[in-house]
Amino acid sequence: MQTSLFQLNTSNFSPSFIKQELSFGPFFKMILKKQHAEVGIKAKLYQHILDKFWGDKKTQDTIKVTDAEQYAELLEVIYATLSPAILDNRPFFWALSTPIPYDVIYSTDPFYEFVQQKKSTNAEDTENEKEQLLRKYYGYAYRLILKKLYNLPGVLDNEIFHAHTDPQHQITRYYQINVDTTFIDVEVEGDLPKLSSDFIDVYLQEHNGIDTLASILPLNKFKLKGFSVITLTDATMRYAIDGLKNILIEENADEVIAFTESFKLLKEIVGTNDIEFGVLPFFRINNNPKAFDLGLYSQSIVMQTAKNNPDPESVYNSILTRISHLKKTFYAPVDVSEDNEAFLNALSLSNTKSFAAIPLFYNSQIVGVLEVFSYKRNVLTKNLLLKLENALPLLAQMVKNSIDNYNISIDQIVLENFTALQAPVSWKFYEAGFNYLIAEKANNHRRMETVCFKDVYPLFGAIDIRNSTVARNIAVQQDFQFILKYLKTTLETLNVNYSSVRFKQIQSKLSVFLKQTSQTLSTTDEIKITRFLKKNMLPFLRAVRTSSKQVKKSIALINADCDGPGYRNRQKLETSMQTINIAISNYLENSKHQLQKIYPAYFDKFRSDGIEYNIYIGQSIAPKLPFNTGMLGKVKLWQLKTMADIARLNQRLRAKLPIDLQTTQLIFINNNTIDITFRNDERRFDVEGAYNIRYEVIKKRIDKVLVKNTNHRLTQPGKIAMVYFSSEDVQEYESYIKQLQQQNLLNNDLEYLELEDLQGLKGLKAIRVGVNCDS
């Protein structure tokens, strides 16, 4: 043990910003309290400690720091009391210090050697470093005051790390300094200033929290009495793991740099520079290993050495064969031998002496391996490899991200040149691509052929959210009313102090806009109000020099970007619409598998205020599978049933929606076939021919059609509307409706309706039936 006095830091300054006294008093009082509370052996132990201190009454008073060595026996008693009884003090970093941890009066030998070594290897602190150290001391003092006098622990950051370069291995290790303030009393001169937790929440989250405290809690009014207990904890593992996490979450990070920095952290974990690291991700295309010579393996020592091998492919295959299905770490010395696997011989040529491959698993699937190797013998051991265990999940995530980025790059190339293909029609695109490739090989520079499907039956459906535009206008109106009323109240609180012309103008404009919000707002009105809030009201409020919470909340209200109380009603509407659309979309995604079981069909849905979809089915979609009208009938029945299910789904959702919204269901009946062609420029299917184009025109115009001689729309909540031209078209659907009525899905309220003429469309008719949403 060390009883000589020394300073914890190299900076030559004394923390005189606060009064402090070295004293055993707080320790004595705590032991006395415990002695009264305990019985048996513990009580006798505490009494023995008290007897030691009662022998010298001065020990309960202030002690000069320079005289601390005279109390070596009592210091040893404190150490024996506070440290584990069976602990060997050689590896234990422990010390006693003044209340502000600056002068160390007693320490274990390892602690003393650590500080002295750090001082000998570090240059004298710069002025900036001294300033930073002083601020740390200030922060420590305020943490102590807030904890002891205000019962507010942990307000300011309490973690202090010291980086120390191990002279033997030249590896940086990180130590966390833990200061136990149990045996420190804090005294204040005069009355203790009041300080609320609200004040702490508002101001101390800022970087200048200490400066804020200094203005209301001057440290020269406080005195610290007692001693602090300092311990050092090796936090290298935690620091390195945190570093790996930071690399992992870094957006747009260069992968080479990310892995290089990760390998440095791994060296700190294993504690030596004699270990090197690499990583070998398992890139695949169509579930086959990707050839290594595409620059994808720059971080792999195995693949780098393979490039210099006369037979690089054999090296690549041998490493894949050996480690692609690893369940545990593969470890081997590296020597040239005919019996060795090709990759080990390749490594030996790079002067590698030992090698290990640790499998990296993501969701129980191997995604790559961590390569651990050394150019020295007898350095890489199995015990050393065990130190890496906590880092493996993070490295696996990094490798998985690398693989995902690779796959995304491939997908982008495909999407730029082709399209996202649905299984039922993909064969046609591959056929077109094959024909293009054959022509290119024959030097016949033909254009990519047009992908076309002839004589397919189209089925169209639309689920719309009823009156969504009206609901949005109401939400906007209510939100603006809330904002303007709040701002009006704010201005009224300022009326006593502000009477300028500008103030009066803003008040007047606000009143005009507030009056407008009692009526339906146009898009122009919305733009004018928003411009007024941003260009007039906001600069005025910022210019008002006041700490009023009302003003601050008003500024925050204007600055809010699509959130906060000023957007509450619009958020409710958006949430309601999204909930409905997501539920419908998920339902259709699940239901379309039933559709594909009837016959392969192209199913394309897209979102507007609701969801619309197109289905194309016919012999040309799947030439090898026989198609008949009976299959088409099953698809029509499927469509009608899904529309009924969607109406029922909406009814169930209504009670959970922030704003009550209802859907309407529309089907366009068309029993004639059309031709569809894939448009390469728009990456979608479109119709061809005059008649087919007319079909598209009808689809786009019937959603808001009115019942003839009324002002009522055809589409109504809780009902399915089916538009058609001729009576022959609707007869088939009447039988499907009867089936669903028998299943209690539809009501017995079938209506036959004539519709108002639309531009270029005359003679439209419809049938409409209610959905049983209560069953």
Image (cartoon, rainbow, N blue to C red):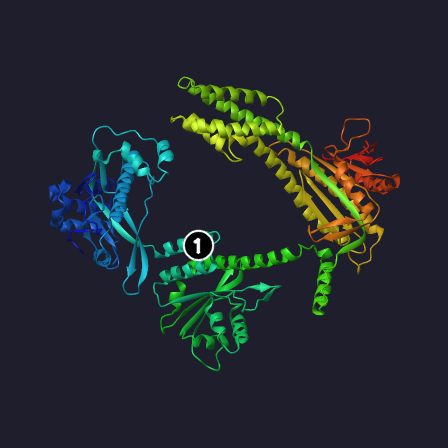
Q: Which residue is mark 1?
A: 247
- Image quarter hosting the C terminus: top right
- Please name the residue shown 59% across and 21% down the image: 518
Say above or below: 261 vs 195: below
Residue 117 sits in which quadrant? Answer: bottom left
Regarding residue 606, the answer to whether it shows in the image is yes
In this rendered view, identify the residue nearer to me: 54 or 680. 680
Regarding residue 479, the answer to whether it shows in the image is no
In the rendering, at what x and y percent does residue 240 appear? Answer: 38, 56
Mark 1 is surrounded, within 10 Å at the Cα level, by few (under 14), some (14 to 19) or many (20 or more) other residues, namely some
Q: As drawn, which residue projects farthest toward the right?
A: 728
- Please name the residue shown 34% across and 41% down the image: 154
Instruction: Please tell me whether mark 1 sits on a helix, a strand or a loop.
Output: helix
In the rendering, at what x and y percent does residue 189 appear? Answer: 20, 31
Mark 1: amino acid = Ile
Say above or below: 36 vs 357: above
Image-based side of 443 in relation to 6, left or right? right
- Image quarter hosting the N terminus: bottom left
Say above or below: 496 vs 650: above
In this rendered view, identify the residue nearer to me: 168 or 416. 416
Image-based side of 203 in relation to 112, left or right? right
- Please name the residue shown 68% across and 31% down the image: 467
Say above or below: 728 vs 616: above
In the rendering, at what x and y percent does residue 442 appear? Answer: 72, 70
Image-based side of 29 in relation to 295, left or right? left
